[in-house]
Image (cartoon, rainbow, N blue to C red):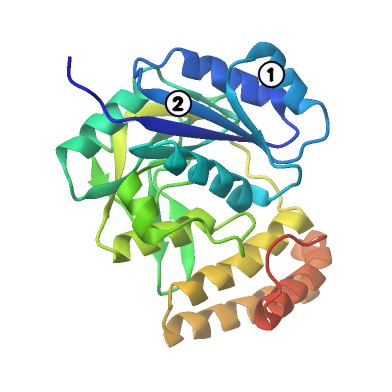
Amino acid sequence: MINKPAVSIIVLNYKSADDTIDCLRSLEHLTYFQAQIIVVDNGSNDGSVEAIRRVYPDITLIDTGANLGFTGGNNIGIQHALDSGADYIMLLNNDTIVAPDMVDIMIEVMEADPAIGVSGPMIYYYDVPDVIWSGGGSIDWKHGTTSMDGINEEDKAQFGLIPREVDFVTGCCILAKRAVWEQVGMLDDKFFMYYEETEWCVRARRAGHKIVHIPTAMMWHKISITAREASPRVYYYMTRNRLLFLRNSRAGLGTWAYILSEYVRTFLSWSLRPKWQDRRHLRSIMLRAIKDFSTGKFGQVTV
């Protein structure tokens, strides 16, 4: 029997034990048997740890004791996986359901090409299982924006069957070889949440590792297909961390000039145009996010 690489799958929980247990149940059906599951609880303090342990008493569960964000919680899991000798490490959102053969397909693709260091599957909406949420990601350096490939498109095999290079894969499910984690390092804790995986993928690409989207590996994400209005908290992190991402990635002067004009236009539109009056409360959030970036205030904040 051929020995297959050891894979550690890190599932981060924060006050959502039901979703985590559903995710773990789907992982029970994996046909890849060399996978270790690591649950990291980010200081939930709502009975999550006890609930997960009742259903999965033998699972590796690390309680951080505090909310360390997507970055900090996953970094603890990554270090544990490295210390345990994992050949591959996967970050997996707890509000997901995976296909039984997803890991098999991803490992087969990555083992076949030594240049591939990072991969991500096709991710669909859980409630609309034939509609794509992410087919990998693209970065528009001119405008300083990122986007999910194929988002909200019905899957009509438009991505084919062959893995394709992408700029980044979402942290909802990201699989990377041990050597990449060791060379590139952990997620940057300054982000806390949002943009951290994109920045990490840029580091990995610039270190010489290919990043691919694998359309035949599939999973489903419990996120609404309806575009939600950004809460002040989400908008704060997305604004501040976009700037942090571009700074860390050494974006050009043209990008910064465009972003400055974009924020000025947005602020004026929210202030003057009646159609955007429901966004006026976000003006102060925008200014605070820009100020915090400028003064080096990163990590978790209260919004």
Asked where in the image residue 215 lies, by quadrant, the reply is top left
Task: Name the image quarter holding the C terminus.
Answer: bottom right
Q: Amino acid at mark 1?
A: Arg
On the rendered structure, is 278 left or right of 148? right
Q: Using the image, determine if residue 160 lies above or below residue 183.
A: above
Between discs 1 and 2, the one toward the N terminus:
2
What residue sits 64% from the left and 57% below the top?
Answer: 192
Q: Which mark is residue 53?
A: 1
Q: Amino acid at mark 2?
A: Gln
What residue sits 37% from the left and 54% below the top?
Answer: 182
Q: Along the line of sight, which residue is nearer the eye, 147 or 181?
A: 181
Q: Using the image, determine if residue 232 lies above or below residue 3.
A: below
Asked where in the image residue 126 lies, by quadrant, the reply is top right
Measured from the top left, where is residue 40 in percent x and y?
Answer: 62, 36
| Residue 157 visible here | no
Residue under label 2, please give it.
36
Mark 1 vs mark 2, CA separation in Å:
16 Å
What residue sits 75% from the left and 27% below the top?
Answer: 48
Task: Name the image quarter holding the N terminus.
Answer: top left
| Residue 55 visible here | yes
Measured from the top left, where is residue 283 in percent x and y?
Answer: 78, 71
Helix, strand or loop at mark 1: helix
On the rendered structure, is 4 left or right of 295? left
Measured from the top left, where is residue 268 in percent x and y?
Answer: 72, 78
Question: Mark 2, residues whose alpha carbon is within 10 Å: few (<14), some, or many (≥20)?
Answer: some
What residue sits 63% from the left and 44% below the top?
Answer: 227
Asked where in the image residue 135 lies, by quadrant, the reply is top left
